Image (spheres, rainbow, N blue to C red):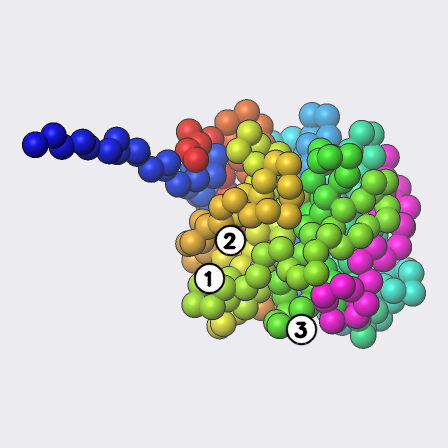
């Protein structure tokens, strides 16, 4: 009897992100804390960080005792020890900001221009807004780019714009958070040809909440996504039904930013330290800043909506 055996094909290993395990720097303690009785008396948190020449520049959300948010600015030579400036760099002035503030910045640099997305809150609606700058200090408001209540699928607020710096198929792409009729706080995707006017790409969220997972309640973009050989890598913030915020990642297709190729089943970072577990909002690590230097990855985050921390990881071999 002749027995023909079919060839056995080895299954491709699952994708894993290019960074390894995260570890807290600065002794596991915050690198920025609230101070004084002014614009950052109640909290300093949710930072975005970029390298600008030989220095690191951080924009962070600062909240005063009345709950109004402004954006503070700090600089560093070593990416850990930051020196704050005495005055905020962006304050609520526009109609869509007054009454609540400017919140949760994210930065991308495209060409010679810095693009700052932030949540503009007027006391009634939170909306995703944009400002641009040549030097991180002089900011020109570009208005609300994803309005609340009027989207293709979102029925309420918009927040958290993370812009990919490289165009794909002649368009720039941005991941953001909005509220679908099927559930609030899910991730959408939009595109633009000029970085100023944005169009929602889908009729539904690109990354939905997952029942029973660490992101069952909130799915919100973190820092600006990165183009990698395997795809578009986005670190994101997820919260479960108890509103414990942890960190995940998602990989989108290089040629189709609306197509998910892989997604973390478990978080890569979670609140553990006392200042992450207790604060204005307990049980929160919220990543909004990412800087790579060689094999080193630095992730900047807010702890419990009160402090700023930084974690470190190193490049590892990527599988797919």
User: Which label's residue is closer to the chain start, 3 or 1?
Assistant: 3
Label disc, if present, on residue 202 of the rendered structure: none
Q: Is 169 or 158 nearer to us in this picture?
A: 169
Quadrant location of the C terminus in the rendered image: top left
Q: Does residue 137 lie above or below 285 as drawn?
A: above
Q: Residue at x 72, y 67 (%)?
A: 154
Residue at the far left: name it.
Answer: 1
Q: Give the residue at mark 1.
A: 214
Q: Position of residue 238 (x, y in %)?
A: 54, 59
Discs 2/3, front: 3
Q: Per the image, is 132 magenta?
A: yes
User: Which label's residue is closer to the chain start, 2 or 1?
Assistant: 1
Q: Secondary structure at mark 3?
A: loop
In the image, the segment drawn in magenta is 131-155
Q: Give the residue at mark 3.
A: 181
Q: Secondary structure at mark 2?
A: strand
Label disc, if present, on residue 247 of the rendered structure: 2
Q: Is 212 or 273 nearer to us in this picture?
A: 212
Q: Residue at x 72, y 65 (%)?
A: 153
Q: Position of residue 89 (x, y in %)?
A: 82, 48
Distance Cα–Cα, label 2 vs label 1: 9 Å
Q: Residue at x 49, y 64 (%)?
A: 210
Q: Residues within 10 Å of mark 2 (few under 14, many from 20)?
A: many
Q: Per the image, is 257 magenta?
A: no
Q: How many marks?
A: 3
């Amino acid at each position: 009897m002749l027995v023909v055996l079919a060839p056995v094909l080895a299954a491709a290993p699952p994708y894993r992100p290019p960074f390894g395990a995260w570890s807290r720097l600065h002794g596991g303690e915050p690198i920025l804390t609230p101070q004084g009785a002014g614009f950052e008396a109640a909290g300093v948190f949710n930072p975005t960080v970029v390298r600008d020449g030989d220095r690191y520049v951080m924009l962070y959300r600062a909240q005063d005792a009345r709950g109004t948010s402004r954006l503070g600015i700090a600089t560093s030579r070593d990416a850990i020890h930051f020196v704050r400036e005495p005055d905020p760099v962006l304050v609520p002035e526009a109609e869509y900001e007054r009454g609540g503030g400017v919140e949760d910045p994210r930065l991308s640099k495209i060409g010679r221009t810095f693009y700052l997305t932030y949540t503009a809150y007027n006391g009634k609606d939170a909306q995703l807004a944009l400002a641009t700058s040549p030097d991180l200090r002089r900011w020109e408001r570009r208005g609300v780019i994803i309005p609340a209540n009027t989207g293709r699928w979102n029925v309420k607020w918009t927040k958290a714009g993370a812009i990919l710096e490289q165009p794909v198929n002649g368009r720039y792409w941005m991941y953001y958070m909005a509220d679908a009729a099927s559930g609030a706080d899910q991730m959408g995707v939009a595109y633009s040809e000029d970085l100023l006017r944005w169009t929602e790409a889908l009729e539904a969220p690109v990354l939905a909440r997952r029942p029973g997972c660490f992101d069952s309640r909130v799915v919100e973009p973190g820092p600006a996504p990165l183009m990698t050989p395997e795809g578009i890598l986005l670190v994101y913030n997820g919260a479960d039904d108890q509103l414990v915020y942890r960190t995940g990642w998602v990989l989108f297709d290089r040629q189709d930013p609306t197509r998910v190729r892989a997604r973390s089943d478990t978080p890569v970072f979670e609140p553990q330290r006392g200042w992450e577990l207790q604060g204005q909002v307990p049980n929160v690590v919220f990543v909004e800043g990412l800087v790579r230097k060689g094999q080193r990855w630095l992730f900047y985050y807010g702890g419990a909506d009160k402090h700023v921390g930084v974690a470190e990881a190193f490049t590892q071999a990527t599988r797919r």
